[in-house]
Image (cartoon, rainbow, N blue to C red):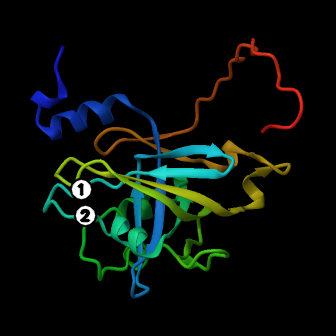
Amino acid sequence: MEVSPETLPHSSVYKLLTGAILPRPIGWISSLDEDGRPNLAPFSFFNVVCSRPATVVFCPLVRGTDGGLKDTLRNVRATGEFVVNIVTEELVEAMNLSSVEALPELNEFEFSGAATSPSTAVRPPRVAESPIHFECRVRQIVEISDQPGGGSLVIGTVVHIHVDERVLIGTDKIDLKALKPIGRLAGGGYVRVTDIFEIERPKSQIPAREGPPK
């Protein structure tokens, strides 16, 4: 197959992208609208950007059903805050329920059965059952396209981190066996982190910097 994406329906390009770029981490994003109503939704177009400052990104797509913007995007634009909740095997059913397309009035916490817990530095609540949370303030929103198949990049600066002691080794290492994270595949497919192997990375051939970084 040799094809330019411009010649295909966006739905076909989506299937090719999500069927090849995997497994994808899931950012379970909680937010509030301007009236303080909570929203909870999962995004598998999600990842870490850098650690100084601690930065994450997730990408809300334009809804295919009606061409509208997702509530999460509207909320973070309006309030500038959100929380990334990490999805575990125990939370996968609640995460799936929270992916429902619904009117803004629906409280996905209640719909999915997920409990709320207050955050420390931002207003949106956390998912109480999740063992890891990243409280974030919006740094930048980059709109790629507002058409069906389009989307935006929401770049967030992490301002507070919660890690349950049961998934923590020492002071800064996550215990994968205890965390049991879930990854996203194509369609309705998900993957567990159960087959782990390690490989040594090649040593750097670049001389180390002398003195403090500028």
Question: Counting other residues with Cα less than 10 Å from the Cα at mark 1, is it few (<14), some (14-19), or many (20 or more)?
Answer: many
In-front residue for pair 146/186: 146
Q: Quadrant for the C terminus, please.
A: top right
**Gap between marks 2 and 1 measured at Cα:** 5 Å
| Left or right: 167 as drawn, with respect to 116 | right
Please give the residue where the numbered disc 2 appears in the rendered image: 69
Question: Counting other residues with Cα less than 10 Å from the Cα at mark 2, is it few (<14), some (14-19), or many (20 or more)?
Answer: some
13 up-or-down from 134: above or below: above
* Mark 2 and mark 1 residues within 8 Å of each other at the beta carbon: yes
Residue type highlighted by circle 2: Leu
Q: x, y (%) of residue 112?
A: 40, 71
Q: Earlier in the sequence, mark 2 or mark 1?
A: 1
Secondary structure state at the residue bearing disc 2: loop
| Left or right: 198 as drawn, with respect to 125 | right
Q: x, y (%) of residue 46?
A: 46, 48
Residue type highlighted by circle 1: Val
In-front residue for pair 27/137: 137
31 up-or-down from 28: above or below: below
In-front residue for pair 205/105: 205
Please give the residue where the numbered disc 1 appears in the rendered image: 62
Q: Quadrant for the N terminus, please.
A: top left
Which quadrant of the figure has residue 141? bottom left
| Left or right: 56 as drawn, with respect to 66 | right
